[in-house]
Amino acid sequence: MPAIRSAHKVTLGIGGARRNAAVALCRNGEVIAACEQERITRARDAGMPPEGFPREAMEAVLQIAGCTRADVTACGFAEDGIEVPPDLPGLRLPHHLAHATAAFLTSPFREAVVVICGQSVCPEVAVFMADGSGIRDLGWPWQGRGFTGLYSLLTEAVGLAPQKDEHRMEALARQGDGGKGQDRQAVSALFALERDRLSIDPNLAERVATLMSVRTSTSMSFATRQPGVAGALQAHLGDLLIEFLRGVRAQVPTANLCLAGGLFYNTNINTRIRQSRVFDEVFIPVHPGNAGLAVGCALAAIPDGERPSTGTLVSPFLGPEYPETETKAILDNCKLSYGYADDGELIRDAVEALRRGHLLGWFQGRMEWGPRALGARSILASPSAPYVLENLNAFLKRRDPPRSYAVSICEEDLDRWFDGPSPSALMQFEHRVKDAAAFSQIMSGPDAPIRVHTVGRHPPALRRLLTAFGQATGLPVLVNTSFNGFHEPIVCTPRDAVRVFYGTGLDMLVAGNFVIRK
């Protein structure tokens, strides 16, 4: 007997074929669920499995939505290496169109220009116009390597792995804080924007190596030079990208900008674009890279006439959620001693632990979609706790010192403590602190910016904790980093959280209203 389809119109989207495979689900034109394969299989940055389809992530989003495979009317994808199972109606979509769809239809805009910076598909830079009548490729005449590909070249030039360590390049550049006079002058000769192409010195790697080996004083070590050069390289690339965006703005009728592509995981570049005011409003989806194609493909697979025609903000909390009964069963199965607290007691206990300088695992509600910890799967700490950076680096992350960490703050408190774009609900922008003494324990340098996550109404539990911590300490800010072990994906299930809690230097775990202490 054939399966009976539900009345709901369900589409799937697949993204991240080469790295970080993911699946998203739309029901009746709305993004309902999204999940990365790595969160389920626990293999970090997992691309497509040998069969070419992320079945585990698909099953997760179907379960979240209360659907079955028989309910799926289309399964969109936009990359090579994806093999849709024969029982699902596969739909191949243009790569850049899927990016543009993800960026525009999850934005707050009724019209916008979408700029895509990638490196896996030509052209590496593309421009789309999006409004109620559709999403149209403007056919921008870009030639050759784009800004994302250039950033990978720069990553390799400073001694890191291209298409892998770009986040480390960003962190290194943050320590360098944009580079200084001589470095900025030197790197400006290495690459330039010539209308719709980048002119890149063929000896770029050798010239960067020379810059990093130069000693301007006997006290300046290689380790000191490297951040300065990295900062100058990133700053110059940002200058050229803003110059390009000015050219785009001159030819489009809208002052709204959506950005898509892996380059826009970079918070420094995002901040510079936002603060340049080339466009009045700037939106970056929570997952701008190829994993985020899952959302764009799920939306683009909706038939014409049924697809949303303008943007609607989508929650970043699109992953699995676990009821208290399941969490309790896991804790009991692990034979753990734990407590249960009501909301008020829970917040008081958490504040007291944070004031003591403890590291807190925070597991609440639906898991985040995307690489940022936004208060559902977070590790939290007091920004004024002694040695907080050292403890996070040594006992949890094993990151290169002195790597800094992001902070969370209630949206209405941002302007009192930081200078920078508001809001920053997806942790996509950098800010300058107004009181350096209050944040001296977590800054990687005296003038280094900090990534900031602003909390509005959601997630409510983190908002209550920030408010209570501020009332208790006078500083309504918490260090917030992703809840994961060494070189692992962010935790997904309560069992993942328990394993990381006992396998790292965390002091306390809050899972829903359950509390576990060491």
Image (cartoon, rainbow, N blue to C red):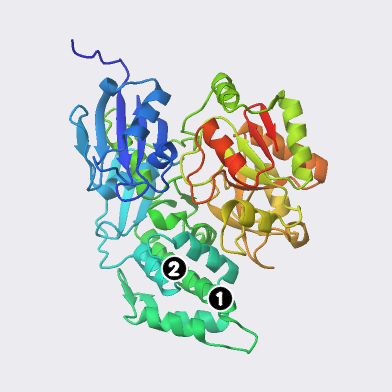
The residue under the point 56% across, 63% down is 400
Which residue corresponds to the image point at 55% horizontal and 80% vertical from the top-left?
222
Figure label count: 2
Label 1 – label 2 distance at C-alpha: 15 Å
Locate residue 219, reporting x and y percent: 65, 85
Q: Which class describes the residues within 10 Å of circle 2: few (<14), some (14-19), or many (20+)?
A: some
Question: What residue does disc 1 label?
Answer: 228
Mark 1: amino acid: Gly
Residue 185 point in image, percent of width and height: 50, 83
On the image, the x and y values in percent for residue 394 come to 63, 56
Residue 160 visible? The answer is yes
Tell me the quadrant of the picture where the C terminus can be found.
top right
Circle 1 or circle 2, nearest the eye: 2
279 is higher (above) or lower (below) than 56? below
Secondary structure of residue under mark 2: loop
Furthest residue toward top: 1
| Front in this rendered view, residue 80 or 193 | 80
Check disc 2 and give the amino acid type.
Answer: Leu
Q: Which mark is residue 160?
A: 2
Choose the circle earlier in sequence order: 1 or 2: 2
Along the viewing direction, whichever of 25 and 126 lies nearer the viewer:
25
Residue 378 seen by the camera: no
Q: In this view, does 87 lie above or below 250?
A: above
